[in-house]
Amino acid sequence: MWRYTWLPHKKTPRHFHANDVVVVQLADGVLASITPDGKTVMNATSVGLTKFNPRGRIHEEELVKGKATAVIVELK
């Protein structure tokens, strides 16, 4: 389990999720999730929003609006 804060217009390193994760958002904003083939999905975040993300994803993320900080729990 860890807490992460995205910085405006600074992409995270590309990474692979080997395990399922549950993400609890602590701020309101918009994150762009970018896959290796360049496809981008905009994900709105809001305080308390909780999402399950399945393992097997490769992507990088960028905060494009507002703020984004979350508690992330990796499931094993």
Image (cartoon, rainbow, N blue to C red):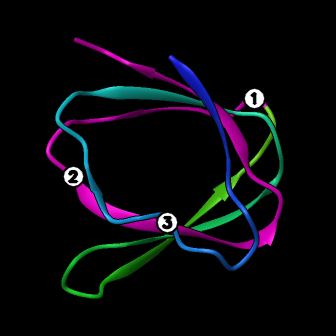
Q: Mark 1 near mark 3, Cβ–Cβ under 8 Å? A: no
Residue kind at label 2, given as amino acid type: Arg
Q: Which residues are magenta?
A: 48-76
Numbered badge on residue 48: 1
**How many numbered markers are drawn?**
3
Crowd band around label 3 with a 10 angstrom C-alpha radius: few (<14), some (14–19), many (20+): many
Q: Is residue 22 left or right of residue 18?
A: right
Against 46, is 34 above or below? below
Identify which residue is drawn at 21% across, 78% down: 36
Residue 33 placed where, x, y %?
44, 68
Disc 1/disc 3 C-alpha distance (Å)? 19 Å
Against 34, is 27 above or below? above
Numbered badge on residue 57: 2
Q: Closer to the N terminus: mark 1 or mark 3?
A: 1
Against 35, is 26 above or below? above
Numbered badge on residue 32: none
Q: List the single residue furthest toward the bottom.
A: 38
36 falls in the magenta region: no
Task: Locate the C terminus and report the quarter of the image it occupies.
Answer: top left
Residue 9 placed where, x, y %?
69, 79
Identify which residue is drawn at 21% across, 28% down: 19
Numbered badge on residue 61: 3
Look at the magenta stretch and give its main secondary structure.
strand
Disc 2/disc 1 C-alpha distance (Å)? 23 Å
Q: Is residue 45 left or right of residue 72?
A: right
Q: Closer to the N terminus: mark 2 or mark 1?
A: 1
Q: Is residue 13 left or right of residue 31?
A: left
Disc 2/disc 3 C-alpha distance (Å)? 12 Å
Element at label 1: loop
Residue kind at label 3, given as amino acid type: Glu
Element at label 3: strand
